[in-house]
Image: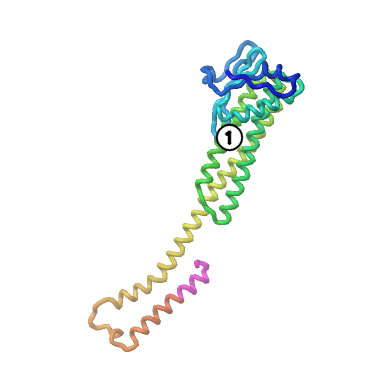
Amino acid sequence: MRNSKEGGSSGNAGNIKSLWHHDFKEPNWCRGVFSYTPGKLTRLVFPTYVGGKVGRLCVEVKEESLLIHAPKDAEVIMSEALKSLKSVEAPSLLNALRTLFKVLLSHYHEELSTLDNETEELIHGMMRGKVRHKPIYRLYDRAARLHRGVHGLIYALQRLDNVYPELRDLTDEAIMLENMLSTTIDRIVQAFNLYYTLVGERTNYVVTKLTVISAIFLPLTLIAGIYGMNFKYMPELSHPLGYPATLATMAAIALGELIYFKKKGWI
């Protein structure tokens, strides 16, 4: 196991060195879920969202020391938590736990804010005609993974509540974050619905245009079909004005249909 490097004020360095340890290797017990010793929490395993991925965060309380086994992607978060702990006047096991969970909450809030902004930009782009589905899938996937991380955080804080009731305010904040995330997921689902609505409208528009074109050419095709029949006695065929009269009639029918469709608002 790799101990954290000393830092901060000289008065706190020794305390922090003995209080906080973290590494990026997963021990065997980290594959479990939860275990107790009589009246005291010893180990806690819960999912966490870091680096765009869902991993396991394993926390062990051992002889008033906090041992954390985190995925490699969580190195920045561990460094930030350790830096925050060094600024605490009186480092303690409770403060170490509070610092760890506050940094995770802050990380999740930042990710949620990014998701909110990207969702709104996507919806505004769709309203301007940029209809794409892949960005919606990516946003939903990120939101779902973040949701797992927030659920894991709530689970961990609620299990800690029996031993460290002082962390109850963080539980309330995590639940509030979950509610905010649920709203964001609803917005992404609305973006899905908007996408399919816009695609449906585009399809209906194209079908309407094709229907109008077919309706215009249908009587013209009928006339062409009639005069394409090889009957011997068709008086219009020998009339000197037969051809231009037929063309004029066909043009009048097409123009009349266009005017009618325009008045109906179909084109």
Image location of residue 143, percent across then percent down: 57, 38
Q: Who is closer to the viewer here, 249 or 63?
A: 63
- The residue lying at 22 percent from left, 82 percent from top is 232
Which residue lies at the image location 64% right of the left edge and 18% below the top edge? 66
Residue 5 in the image: state x and y as whole percent. Answer: 65, 22
Image quadrant where residue 113 sits? top right
Q: How is the image coloured?
A: rainbow
Give 145 or 186, whichever is nearer the viewer. 145
Q: In terms of secondary structure, where does tag 1 sit?
A: helix
Residue 260 is one of the magenta-drawn residues: yes
Residue 148, magenta (yes or no): no
Looking at numbered disc 1 in the image, what kind of residue is underneath it? Answer: Leu
Residue that label 1 marks: 146
Q: Which residues are magenta?
A: 256-267
114 sits left or right of 229 in the view: right
Q: Position of residue 3 (x, y in %)?
A: 62, 19
- Compared across the picture, whether 50 is left or right of 222 comes to right
